Amino acid sequence: MANDIASKQKTEHWAAGALDVSEIDILRGMLAASNDACWCMEFAKPVDLTAPDHEVVRQIFENGPVWHYCNAAMERLYQLPTGQNMNERPVHEIFPNNPSNQDFIHNLIANGFEVDGAPALDRDYSGMEIYVENDVRAHISDGMLYRMFGTVRNVGKHRRREQSLKDQLAAVEGMIAALPNPFLAIGNLGTIEAVNPAGEGWLGQSSEVLLGRSFEAVLLETQTCQAKLSLLTAMGKVQSLAIPIRVQCSDGQADAVWEIAPRETPSGTGFVVMVTTETKVGR
């Protein structure tokens, strides 16, 4: 009996304590503990969303935007100096009025201020520009924007990686274009995906005509039946066994050595082809 009374008193004490904690305090505690950078921007003067887009953009930057709430993860992301409170710092320090951020606002307008992964170019407190993506929502009433809020993440590393891959691709494409021998890349379904200038000259067709065409159909147009059969058989083995194969064909005028190697693509095994030709010399 005594245990039941003690348990009841404990439950009542917990319930009374819980009533003292407001929902706002609970939410603040959750956001403070989050590793996601969270923010809320309010405007001293609400933004009139019924105005033309360019005027809405101007108001968002000029209608006294302030940070209503930024969590610790937000401060870490933007490298706020130790001991300072981001909610007391001007918004423009990290969200300047620049062309990238104007595009960011236009994107919000076009999507009713409900977007995920919206890109922006911000500046951290060290003065470095950082590429970020925001998931954004807003408080709008009677055509007036009172506040925006959301989460933000740094995507600069991914952009640098993307640019590095683009640079590498451009370098590879340049090297392939400079090859003196015909070179083609064939997809897993047998269509031509890349051809260098030497390949265009050898096949007698431009890349605009060749790309997307069936390589088998092109062989039918340019090779003898015997050569075509040998090459198709070799290409079938390359795809099924994933091994390189060397084929020599002759059309009476020249010997052609075909180097066929497997090439992995997102949708299956294709292959690359490089051809070396040697004109026959009469004896």
Image: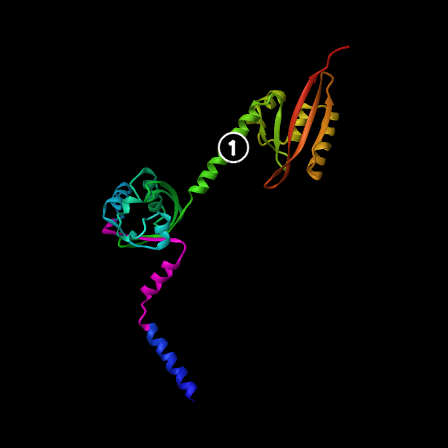
Q: Quadrant of the N terminus?
A: bottom left
Residue type, mark 1 in image = Gln
| Residue extending farthest front | 82
Q: In front: 246, or 37?
A: 37
Label 1 environment density (alpha carbons within 10 Å; few <14, some 14–19, many ≥20): few
Q: Is residue 274 visible?
A: yes
Q: Is residue 137 visible?
A: no
Q: Position of residue 93 (x, y in %)?
A: 28, 44
Q: Residue at x 44, y 40 (%)?
A: 159
SS label for mark 1: helix
Judge whether 247 appears above or below 23 on screen.
above
Q: Position of residue 224 (x, y in %)?
A: 72, 23
Q: In front: 186, or 283?
A: 283
Q: How many marks?
A: 1
Is residue 31 rendered magenta in the image?
A: yes
Dividing the picture into quadrants, the one containing residue 275 is top right
Question: Label 1 belongs to which residue?
Answer: 168
Span of residues in magenta: 19-47
Q: In front: 177, or 17?
A: 17
